[in-house]
Amino acid sequence: MLCCVAIYISILMDSQKKALLRERILERSAEIGMRIAALEESTKPISPDKGLGRLTRLEAMQDKSVNEAALERLKDEEVRLQNALIKILMPDFGICQGCGNEINFDRLEALPGSTHCTACAG
Protein backbone atom coordinates (compact mmCIF):
# COMPACT_ATOMS: atom_id res chain seq x y z
CA MET A 1 0.00 0.00 0.00
CA LEU A 2 2.83 2.41 0.90
CA CYS A 3 4.45 1.68 -2.48
CA CYS A 4 1.24 2.62 -4.33
CA VAL A 5 1.00 5.89 -2.38
CA ALA A 6 4.61 6.74 -3.24
CA ILE A 7 3.95 6.05 -6.93
CA TYR A 8 0.78 8.18 -6.83
CA ILE A 9 2.64 11.07 -5.16
CA SER A 10 5.40 10.75 -7.76
CA ILE A 11 2.85 10.91 -10.60
CA LEU A 12 1.08 13.84 -8.93
CA MET A 13 4.37 15.72 -8.57
CA ASP A 14 5.15 15.05 -12.20
CA SER A 15 1.80 16.45 -13.28
CA GLN A 16 2.30 19.50 -11.05
CA LYS A 17 5.77 20.06 -12.52
CA LYS A 18 4.43 19.62 -16.03
CA ALA A 19 1.66 22.15 -15.31
CA LEU A 20 4.26 24.62 -14.03
CA LEU A 21 6.43 24.05 -17.09
CA ARG A 22 3.44 24.46 -19.38
CA GLU A 23 2.68 27.84 -17.77
CA ARG A 24 6.30 28.93 -18.19
CA ILE A 25 6.28 27.83 -21.82
CA LEU A 26 3.09 29.77 -22.54
CA GLU A 27 4.44 32.89 -20.79
CA ARG A 28 7.73 32.70 -22.67
CA SER A 29 5.94 32.06 -25.95
CA ALA A 30 3.78 35.17 -25.49
CA GLU A 31 6.88 37.22 -24.64
CA ILE A 32 8.67 35.93 -27.73
CA GLY A 33 5.63 36.68 -29.88
CA MET A 34 5.74 40.33 -28.83
CA ARG A 35 9.49 40.57 -29.42
CA ILE A 36 9.13 38.93 -32.84
CA ALA A 37 6.48 41.47 -33.83
CA ALA A 38 8.75 44.35 -32.80
CA LEU A 39 11.76 42.88 -34.60
CA GLU A 40 9.77 42.21 -37.77
CA GLU A 41 8.93 45.89 -37.84
CA SER A 42 12.58 46.86 -37.45
CA THR A 43 13.78 44.44 -40.15
CA LYS A 44 11.68 45.85 -42.95
CA PRO A 45 13.69 46.93 -45.99
CA ILE A 46 15.24 50.39 -45.83
CA SER A 47 13.87 52.37 -48.73
CA PRO A 48 16.48 54.11 -50.89
CA ASP A 49 14.44 57.31 -50.99
CA LYS A 50 14.76 57.70 -47.23
CA GLY A 51 16.73 60.90 -46.59
CA LEU A 52 19.65 59.36 -44.73
CA GLY A 53 23.27 60.34 -44.94
CA ARG A 54 25.82 57.72 -45.99
CA LEU A 55 26.93 56.80 -42.45
CA THR A 56 23.41 56.87 -41.10
CA ARG A 57 22.26 54.57 -43.90
CA LEU A 58 25.14 52.14 -43.21
CA GLU A 59 24.28 52.16 -39.50
CA ALA A 60 20.62 51.49 -40.32
CA MET A 61 21.64 48.58 -42.53
CA GLN A 62 23.88 47.17 -39.79
CA ASP A 63 21.10 47.50 -37.21
CA LYS A 64 18.75 45.73 -39.61
CA SER A 65 21.26 42.88 -39.98
CA VAL A 66 21.62 42.51 -36.20
CA ASN A 67 17.84 42.56 -35.78
CA GLU A 68 17.41 39.91 -38.48
CA ALA A 69 19.80 37.60 -36.63
CA ALA A 70 17.94 38.17 -33.35
CA LEU A 71 14.65 37.52 -35.13
CA GLU A 72 15.89 34.18 -36.46
CA ARG A 73 17.03 33.11 -32.98
CA LEU A 74 13.65 34.03 -31.52
CA LYS A 75 11.79 32.16 -34.25
CA ASP A 76 13.93 29.08 -33.55
CA GLU A 77 13.16 29.35 -29.85
CA GLU A 78 9.46 29.74 -30.61
CA VAL A 79 9.53 26.48 -32.60
CA ARG A 80 11.32 24.69 -29.73
CA LEU A 81 8.70 26.00 -27.28
CA GLN A 82 5.83 24.87 -29.50
CA ASN A 83 7.44 21.43 -29.76
CA ALA A 84 7.81 21.35 -25.97
CA LEU A 85 4.10 22.16 -25.57
CA ILE A 86 3.26 19.18 -27.75
CA LYS A 87 5.79 16.84 -26.11
CA ILE A 88 4.80 17.81 -22.54
CA LEU A 89 1.68 15.68 -23.00
CA MET A 90 3.75 12.60 -23.81
CA PRO A 91 5.11 10.27 -21.14
CA ASP A 92 8.70 10.60 -22.38
CA PHE A 93 8.80 14.39 -21.89
CA GLY A 94 11.83 15.33 -19.81
CA ILE A 95 13.83 12.29 -20.90
CA CYS A 96 17.19 13.02 -22.54
CA GLN A 97 17.30 12.02 -26.20
CA GLY A 98 21.03 11.35 -25.85
CA CYS A 99 21.38 9.09 -22.83
CA GLY A 100 17.78 8.32 -21.83
CA ASN A 101 18.14 9.74 -18.31
CA GLU A 102 15.76 12.25 -16.79
CA ILE A 103 16.51 15.91 -17.59
CA ASN A 104 16.92 17.98 -14.43
CA PHE A 105 13.74 19.97 -13.65
CA ASP A 106 15.76 23.18 -13.14
CA ARG A 107 17.13 22.82 -16.67
CA LEU A 108 13.63 22.28 -18.08
CA GLU A 109 12.38 25.25 -16.12
CA ALA A 110 15.12 27.49 -17.56
CA LEU A 111 15.07 25.98 -21.06
CA PRO A 112 11.71 24.24 -21.55
CA GLY A 113 12.60 23.23 -25.09
CA SER A 114 15.59 21.16 -23.88
CA THR A 115 15.75 17.68 -25.32
CA HIS A 116 19.10 16.77 -23.75
CA CYS A 117 20.39 16.69 -20.18
CA THR A 118 23.25 18.95 -19.15
CA ALA A 119 25.85 16.23 -19.66
CA CYS A 120 24.71 15.41 -23.21
CA ALA A 121 24.15 19.04 -24.19
CA GLY A 122 27.65 20.14 -23.19
Image (spheres, helix red, strand yellow):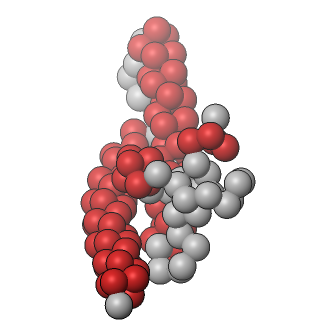
Q: Nearer the viewer, residue 15 or 40?
A: 15
In this figure, what is the number of numbered marks?
A: 0
Residue 33 in view of the camera:
no
Q: Quadrant of residue 98?
A: bottom right
* Quadrant of the snapshot with the N terminus: bottom left
Q: Could you tell me residue 24's position as x and y percent?
A: 30, 60
Q: Residue at x 46, y 16 (%)?
A: 59
* Quadrant of the snapshot with the C terminus: top right
Q: Could you tell me residue 60's position as x and y percent?
A: 44, 23
Q: Quadrant of residue 108?
A: bottom left
Residue farthest along the right direction in this orientation = 98
Q: Nearer the viewer, residue 23 or 27?
A: 23
Residue farthest along the front direction in this orientation = 1
Q: Residue at x 40, y 19 (%)?
A: 52
Residue 84 in view of the camera:
yes
Q: Residue at x 51, y 16 (%)?
A: 58
Residue 36 in the figure: left or right of residue 69: left
Q: Nearer the viewer, residue 87 or 122?
A: 122
Q: Nearer the viewer, residue 16 or 40?
A: 16
The answer to whether 7 is drawn above or below residue 98 in the figure is below
